[in-house]
Image (spheres, grey):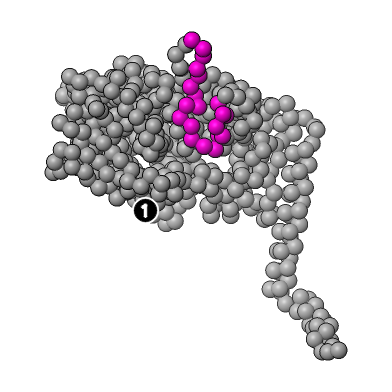
Amino acid sequence: MDTSNATNSIDDRPRLFAALQHNPYIQAIVTVFVACLCTRILSSQWFEAAKYSNRRGIEPPTLPYWIPGLKHAFSMGYDSKRFLAKCLNKFGDGTPFFVDAAGQRLLLILDPEHIKGVLRSSKELDPNPFIHDKILSALMGSPQEAIDHYKSDGGNTDYIQTTHIRQHTTGSNLNALGKRLFDTLSRSVEQALLPQADSEWTEIPDLYAFFQHHVTLAIAETLLGSAIVQSYPEIISDLWTHIEHTDQFFMGLPRFVIPKAYAARDRLLENIRNWSKKVESLRQQNALGTHWDAVAGSQLLQERETLYGELPGHDVHGRAAQTLGLLYGGTSLTVPISFWYFFETARDRDLQHRVLDELKTHAVPESSSYNLMKLAACPLLRSMHAETTRYYSSNLTIREVIVPQYALGAKYVLGKGTTVFIPNKYAAQYTSAWAQVRPQAITKPLDTFWPERYIVAEKGKPERFSDVGLAGNWTSFGGGEHKCPGRHFARNIGIVTLAVLLGVFECEVLDLKGAHKTDPRLKEYAFGTMKPTGKVAARICRRPNRNSIPK
């Protein structure tokens, strides 16, 4: 028997112990490893103890972590989208939990009862602290004087702003915005096809890029006017650079870490400031168009300039940050959702024929357009849009506790200053809760796209759209008193894209089977823009005789 290897191993042990005893580097490595391992074991035990405790009035558990003090900071800083997705995929059984990035604590909730309670408790939980500090200040670059004003007036400015947006995105004002958007998008796509002859196909190598450019441009021109888009053609690319770095701005990363994002925001704000000065000059001359102006844009934006111009801290810099915020809000989620709204229709032949029938029914031949108000009331189109937002909206609804204590259900208590995150995509796939309030809505699994999910059919009555009882299950537009005031405009943007790309034009996906391979991995990221994982080839042509009514 060869015992040399065993003997050598035994002889090496004193050397290893000696190295550990006298080498400070090895000692440091071992100490860090042991500390991290013990921290992980202890934090896991604390998590389990809080999760399964029968006590009431306790704080929700914090997810297990490895590093004392820093906790989840490295994971959040490196890739917060993936890290939060992993947390939700592993621990998303309905138990609320904290993620702690070196003292910055985020509470994630998925239980629909918890969500309903949070959204309905507008006096105890408020979105505005997060809006002021993270969105307006960190993301939009709003001056501190403006932020101080928002915080000092008891939320009156926030209420006025929300009410003003709601006034301009409902009723006749909504219809006017929709018509302007329809005309602008039709013209933009038309110009992209020139000088192609009628009925001749134009190849689109990347459908999402094509869609993103034209729809973003149409929204920007509808809101801000055509002059700024013409003088600053980079507005589209700069805006999306800004949008794609949202989480880095939220984390407060400095300019040298994300220089391109800061440079894009600088250009956006500079050009919006120039736009604001031109609008003010035209106002002084009483030379503005009433409902829409090529320079000043929509009535909504014109009135906002006047409204904010009278507030403390809202010089041209403060107003520019507000305008950028509105443009961001009108595109960041709406454009991707509208893409999937169109894309799901384009790749389902049966659904496409049904949508074309609706377009034909509500066409207005004399103006080569459509009755957008009637299309917006169509049960199928409403259900399709609701399902698209449920399935593809990867946004977060955020509230902050503003009272000393808030009871989250019967077990948990949240302290003042706690930031509550509702990951809408994950909350919308909480099957057990849907089964309780709308069992027929889960005839097809929630992890699939089903256009008719929100349609209710009663015997002897026509089909209708309904989201009754789903307040804690479908939260893509928030909820309660602070529900998104522009949600109707967002829906109409989707309807306009269908009308233009299927009615005025004919847009086809070339490889339907291959297109499915580019579907986004829905649970890989907790939030962010949902777009295809690869290029989707398509083609587009004008309808015969430039008639916007499908045959």
> Residue 228 at what x, y percent from top left?
23, 38
Left or right relative to 502: residue 404:
right
- Magenta span: predominant SS is loop
The image quarter in which residue 305 lies:
top left
The image quarter in which residue 541 lies:
top left
In depth, the one of 406 and 470 nearer the eye is 470
Residue at image location 38% in from the left, 44% down from the top:
512
Q: Is residue 56 magenta?
A: no
Residue at image location 61% in from the left, 38% down from the top:
108
Circle 1 residue:
260
Extreme-right residue of the structure: 1
The image quarter in which residue 162 lies:
top left
Q: Which residues are the magenta region?
A: 441-460
In depth, the one of 255 and 333 nearer the eye is 333
Residue at image location 36% in from the left, 53% down from the top:
260
> Residue 328 at what x, y percent from top left?
38, 37
Query: Is 485 drawn above or below residue 70 in the view shown?
Result: above
Residue at image location 54% in from the left, 44% down from the top:
523
Left or right relative to 527: residue 67:
right
Query: Is 38 drawn above or below residue 272 in the view shown?
Result: below
| Element under disc 1 | helix
Kind of residue sitting beneath label 1: Lys
State which quarter of the image contains the C terminus. top left
Q: Does any portion of residue 314 appear in the rendered image?
A: no
- The residue carrying pointer 1 sits among few (fewer than 14), some (14 to 19) or many (20 or more) residues within 10 Å by Cα, namely some
State which quarter of the image contains the N terminus. bottom right
